[in-house]
Image (spheres, grey):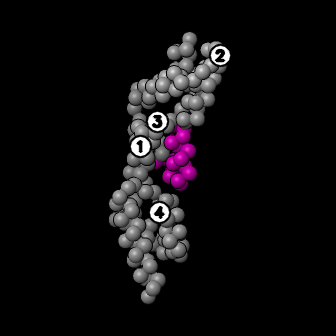
């Protein structure tokens, strides 16, 4: 009886959390595990949440991409690696990353690199390019785009 109460409480709590913000299956699984539920109960809860559309991997991936790109100014590589770490399927990741407009993406790279470049101290233009390239790579931007933008702006 107590186990049934734990199941219902966990389901209710998971529904509430999923209604507050987008969560993926692996995040919900981790939370349910910390609450002490058995594997079979965790799977039943996740299946229920998916069936009732509390969890939707496509919706989660789109929200994650939008949030990390617009607010954190992350590049596609960093976003992709974080989504893979959350066990999101590759097809869904590709579709979500495709929602980023290429012109906006390039403009964001220029903006992020430009603002960081104003605070970087370098002895010469070669060192400046190297520092900006490393910074851009750490943000998850593609090296080919960074090379093009740095060669265009730094000469």
Q: CA distance from mark 3 to mark 1?
A: 9 Å
Dominant SS in magenta = helix
Q: Which mark is residue 67?
A: 1
Q: 93 above or below 48? A: above
Residue farthest along the top direction in this orientation: 155
Label 2 and label 4: CA atoms lie apart by 49 Å
Q: Quick one: label 4, few (<14), some, or many (20+) residues within 10 Å?
A: many
C-alpha distance separating marks 2 and 3: 27 Å
Q: Nearer the viewer, mark 2 or mark 4?
A: 2
Callout in the foreground (3, 4): 3
Identify which residue, 1 or 121, lies in the foreground: 121
Q: Secondary structure at mark 2?
A: loop
How far apart are the two marked residues, 1 and 2, measured between alpha carbons? 36 Å
- Residue 77 sits inside the magenta stretch: yes
- What residue is pinned by disc 4? 28
Does 22 sit left or right of 81 as displayed?
Answer: left
Q: Residues within 10 Å of mark 1 (few under 14, many from 20)?
A: some
Numbered circle sitting on residue 73: 3
Mark nearer the N terminus (3 vs 1): 1
Q: Earlier in the sequence, mark 2 or mark 4?
A: 4
Q: Residue at x 61, y 29 (%)?
A: 134
Farthest bottom residue in view: 1
Q: Which residues are magenta?
A: 76-92
User: Which residue is disc 2 drawn over?
Assistant: 123
3D distance between C-alphas at marks 3 and 4: 26 Å
In the image, residue 76 lies at what x, y percent?
A: 50, 37
**Vertical placement of residue 151 versus 96, above or below:** above
- What is the quadrant of the N terminus in the image? bottom left
Labels 2 & 4 near each other (Cβ < 8 A) = no
Find out whether the residues at labels 2 and 3 contact each other: C-beta distance under 8 Å.
no
């Amino acid at each position: 009886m107590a186990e049934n109460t734990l199941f219902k409480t966990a389901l209710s709590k998971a529904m509430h959390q999923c209604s507050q913000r987008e969560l993926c299956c692996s995040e919900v699984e981790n939370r349910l595990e910390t609450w002490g539920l058995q594997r079979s109960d965790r799977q039943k809860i996740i299946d229920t949440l998916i069936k009732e559309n509390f969890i939707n991997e496509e919706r989660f991936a789109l929200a994650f991409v939008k949030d990390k790109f617009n607010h954190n100014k992350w590049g596609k590589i960093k976003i992709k690696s974080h989504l893979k770490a959350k066990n999101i399927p590759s097809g869904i990741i590709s579709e979500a990353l495709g929602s980023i407009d290429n012109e906006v993406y390039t403009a964001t790279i220029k903006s992020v690199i430009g603002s960081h470049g104003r605070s970087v101290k370098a002895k010469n233009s070669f060192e400046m390019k190297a520092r900006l390239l490393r910074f851009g790579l750490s943000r998850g931007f593609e090296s080919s785009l960074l090379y093009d933008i740095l060669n265009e702006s730094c000469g």
